[in-house]
Amino acid sequence: SRHVKVADFGIARAAEATTISHPGDILGSVKYMSPEQAAGEPVGPASDLYSLGVVLYEMLTGTLPYSGEDPASMAFQHVHGPLRSPREANPDVPEPLNALTAKLLAKDPEDRHASAAELADDLERVRSGLSPLSVAAEKTTTEMISAPLLSGREQRGQRMALPPRVAAPIMEVFKSGRKVRGRLLRTLAMAL
């Protein structure tokens, strides 16, 4: 089928029926929460792009970009923790997807893609073998190299065996997805 179906509106439905009693209370899944949401700040479209970046990171590496012993420590990692690049977690991740994912996971919303349409354009370019337009690869790579790395103990805690489907050549799988009205964003869920 060429139709995309969005599911799992559990939190959205709960929010409709829930009254948050204290300003700054947070409702959401901490594993996919943007830094601004974890800090209790206003959220917007860039927050959704961050969460999508977490999903993309997980698809590329088989693990989450941040972990913690409890929700509070995981939220702290989203706000303050250094990003372990997707390529460090899985060397098979091509540099264009590595840089694009790192941009989605920027701490500052202003450093992410300006819109989902811009992200879709970049995904389409990567799929065509070009560099993403909105990603300054040199800056992203430099920032990831200069960022403090997780300790060996923390890295061991995040590493896990990659599922066999992740081991396939990523770009081949990525390029095999169908175009839907010229926007790859709609087929991202099938890419890997």
Image (spheres, rainbow, N blue to C red):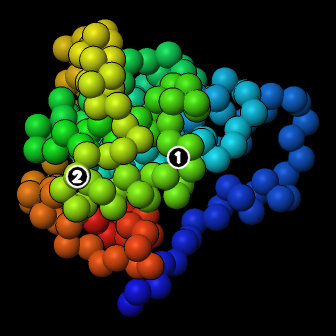
Residue 104: x and y in percent read 44, 39
In the rendered image of this protein, does residue 115 appear above or below residue 23?
A: below
Q: Nearer the viewer, residue 108 or 157?
A: 108
Q: Is residue 103 above or below residue 165?
A: above
Task: Give the residue displayed 32% in from the left and 46% down from the top.
Answer: 132
**8 to 142, vertically: above or below:** below
Residue 167 appears in the figure: yes
**Image position of 35 (left or right of 12):** left
- Provide residue 144's location: percent of width, then percent of height: 29, 20
- Residue located 60% across and 41% down the image: 47
Instruction: Please give the residue where the numbered disc 2 appears in the rendered image.
Output: 130
Amino acid type at mark 1: Leu
Quarter that holds the N terminus:
bottom left
Mark 1 Cα shell of 10 Å, populated few (<14), some (14-19), many (≥20): many
**Whole-percent x and y of residue 42?**
75, 33
Image marks 1 and 2: residues in contact by CB distance under 8 Å: no
Instruction: Choose the circle earlier in sequence order: 1 or 2.
Output: 1
Instruction: Give the distance between the C-alpha atoms of the residues marked 1 and 2, in whole angstroms.
Output: 21 Å
Name the image quarter holding residue 154. Answer: top left
Residue type (three-letter) at the residue carrying disc 2: Leu
Q: Which residue is mark 1?
A: 49
- Alpha-carbon neighbours of circle 2 within 10 Å: few (<14), some, or many (≥20)? few
Residue at 33% across, 61% down: 124
Q: Is residue 74 visible?
A: no
Residue drawn at x 9%, y 59% is 168
